[in-house]
């Protein structure tokens, strides 16, 4: 298995164990590919849920630019909801998992088709 395949398996296990979600592996793979090389950097691979500027970047760069969603309070609310599902006790909130959950939340799987 490649390094990326190992990471995809790690993210799938994280979703199953911490979120109680069985991921769509095709979509998860596309989300991981869409994250690019950031997944290979331990710092960039995770989301700092307490960093407001990072959450703002997710809203702007991912939700608005990648998924094409219009700006509005529902974007920040969805990010907060995903972070709450992940739980404050989970130190590692993986970026591909957060992106996957947001993609599912808004029903924007077509962005990866």
Image: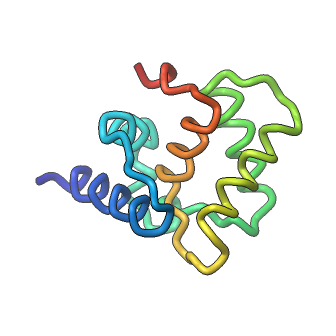
> In the figure, is residue 69 to the left or right of 93?
right
Near-viewer residue (16 or 40): 16
- In the image, what residue occupies the spot 46% across and 43% down? 35
Near-viewer residue (88 or 6): 88
Furthest-bottom residue in this view: 89
Q: Position of residue 23 (x, y in %)?
A: 38, 46
Q: Position of residue 63 (x, y in %)?
A: 67, 34
> In the figure, is residue 43 to the left or right of 62?
left
User: Which part of the image, by quadrant, shows the C terminus?
Assistant: top left
Furthest-right residue in this view: 73
> In the figure, is residue 11 to the left or right of 94?
left
Q: Position of residue 47 (x, y in %)?
A: 60, 61
Number of disc labels: 0
97 versus 105 height, above or below: below
Furthest-left residue in this view: 1
- In the image, what residue occupies the spot 11% across and 53% down? 1
> In the figure, is residue 11 to the left or right of 52?
left
Q: Position of residue 28 (x, y in %)?
A: 38, 42
Residue 21 lies in what quarter of the image? bottom left
- In the image, what residue occupies the spot 37% across and 58% down? 11
Near-viewer residue (55 or 75): 75
- In the image, what residue occupies the spot 33% across and 63% down? 13
């Amino acid at each position: 298995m490649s390094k990326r395949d190992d990471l995809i398996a790690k993210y799938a296990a994280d979703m199953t164990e911490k979120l109680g979600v069985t991921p769509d592996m095709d979509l998860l793979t596309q989300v991981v590919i869409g994250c690019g090389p950031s997944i290979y950097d331990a710092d960039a691979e995770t989301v700092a849920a307490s960093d407001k500027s990072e959450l703002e970047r997710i809203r702007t760069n991912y939700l608005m630019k990648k998924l094409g969603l219009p700006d509005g309070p529902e974007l920040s609310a969805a990010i907060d909801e995903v972070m709450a599902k992940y739980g404050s006790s989970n130190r590692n909130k993986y970026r591909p998992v957060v992106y996957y959950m947001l993609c599912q939340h808004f029903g924007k799987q077509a962005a990866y088709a």
